[in-house]
Image (spheres, helix red, strand yellow):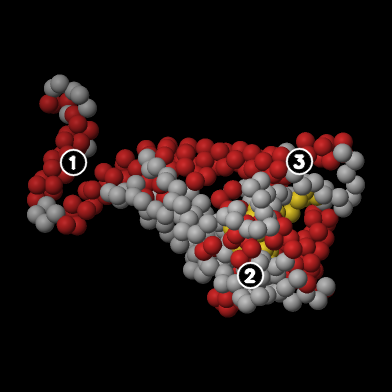
């Protein structure tokens, strides 16, 4: 999950194997006394509710697993973020080169940039590339989590470049610094269709963002399997009515593209005569990628659903055992329960010795 988890250990001997491989002291395996799935744990509550900015994509799962409906609450301020279509490249090398060029262009314009990565390794690769081009930047991942508040506080300043993994700095308002909202009034008027430069059929928001720095720019280096994670990345820009923009850079060699849809897109690129370094940027391609993400989400949902079906059998036993345990701990006088247990034991012993034989002299009373 791209965060350090001190005190947590793998089970079934895996942690000991890693300790042996790394040449450190091998500690004893911890014993798990009880387990429960998150779904059945949540369902133990009498009332269940939650709030998140990305629940809409998981509406079906909330309904089937928890019988909860999802309601979308309108934002307090109009969303002024512009989400551009994905840019598709043949190879990761071409993609990273384009990402660096985009960061350099935005940095030169003094527009703050947040670069989102899927893994810690990719964030460090991009960091090395930026160092080679002498672009000052900050890295926010599991290895630099102590400075998270400091890095997030500076991410909205003019010309700031911040590289972050999906888990780092999530759900935090990045405050925009002086000079970043240069076209704020124009953007507001354009969105409301009330600007002297616009007519009824033309929205100037894109043009404003292209002409001058306007809010935080999100640069995604790869699509995640879940649309929810991508929305969380986009949602770091344009918060509280601020302007902003986002765009993903994708290669056919990325994991999601390699598994779903890369061959079809590659054929399209070949048909169109796309050469090395060229880019495809079209709403149809973006929708195709989102359909691939939806297939992955449905597959993962099926896995969780089947896991829950297996755990429901265990949950019935768990409910009975825990009820007996609670009664033993808090029930007070247990003489009735003890007498019933003694009666059950005696009956089992008698049945084992008599074995259905009718004559008493045939019973194996001595055992």
Are there few (<14), some (14-19), or many (20+) residues within 10 Å of tag 1?
A: few
Q: Secondary structure at mark 2?
A: loop
Q: Earlier in the sequence, mark 1 or mark 3?
A: 3
Q: Nearer the viewer, residue 75 or 206?
A: 206
Residue 84's x, y, as percent?
69, 52
Q: Nearer the viewer, residue 283 or 15?
A: 283
What residue appears at the point 60 percent right and 59 percent down from the top-left corner? 189
Q: Label 2 to label 3, Cα distance in Å? A: 38 Å
Residue 206's x, y, as percent?
69, 56
Residue 236 is at least partly visible in this image? no
Q: Quadrant of residue 163?
A: bottom right
Residue 168's x, y, as percent?
58, 66
Residue at image mark 2 = 181
From this view, report whether residue 285 is shown above or below residue 154.
Answer: above
Q: Which mark is residue 345?
A: 1
Q: Earlier in the sequence, mark 2 or mark 1?
A: 2
């Amino acid at each position: 999950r791209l965060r350090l988890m001190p005190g947590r250990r793998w089970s079934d001997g895996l942690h000991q194997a890693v300790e042996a491989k790394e040449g450190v002291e091998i500690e004893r395996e911890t014993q798990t006394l009880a387990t429960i799935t998150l779904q059945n744990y949540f369902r133990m509550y009498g009332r269940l509710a939650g709030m998140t900015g990305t629940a809409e994509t998981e509406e079906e799962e909330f309904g089937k697993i928890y019988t909860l409906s999802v309601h979308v609450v309108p934002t307090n301020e109009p969303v002024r973020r512009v989400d551009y279509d994905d840019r598709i490249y043949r190879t990761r090398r071409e993609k990273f080169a384009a990402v660096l060029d985009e960061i350099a262009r935005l940095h030169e314009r003094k527009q703050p940039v947040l670069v989102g990565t899927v893994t810690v390794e990719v964030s460090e690769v991009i960091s090395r590339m930026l160092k080679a081009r002498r672009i000052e930047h900050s890295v926010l991942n599991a290895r630099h989590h102590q400075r998270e508040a400091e890095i997030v506080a500076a991410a909205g300043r003019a010309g700031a470049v911040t590289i972050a993994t999906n888990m780092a700095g999530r759900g935090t308002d990045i405050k925009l610094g002086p000079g970043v909202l240069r076209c704020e009034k124009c953007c507001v008027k354009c969105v409301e269709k009330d600007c002297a430069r616009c007519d009824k059929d033309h929205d100037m928001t894109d043009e404003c963002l292209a002409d001058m720095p306007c809010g935080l720019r999100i640069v995604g280096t790869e699509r995640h399997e879940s649309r929810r994670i991508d929305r969380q990345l986009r949602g770091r820009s344009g918060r509280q009515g601020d302007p902003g923009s986002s765009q993903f850079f994708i290669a056919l060699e990325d994991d999601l593209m390699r598994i779903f849809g890369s061959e079809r897109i590659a054929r399209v690129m070949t048909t169109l005569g796309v050469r090395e370094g060229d880019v495809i940027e079209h709403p149809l391609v973006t929708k195709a990628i989102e359909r691939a993400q939806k297939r992955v989400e449905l597959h993962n949902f099926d896995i969780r659903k089947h896991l829950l079906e297996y755990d429901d059998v265990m949950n019935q036993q768990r409910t009975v055992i825990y009820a007996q345990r609670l009664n033993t701990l808090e029930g007070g006088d247990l003489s009735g329960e003890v007498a019933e247990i003694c009666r059950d034991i005696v009956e089992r012993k008698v049945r084992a010795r008599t074995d259905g034989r009718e004559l008493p002299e045939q019973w194996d009373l001595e055992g």
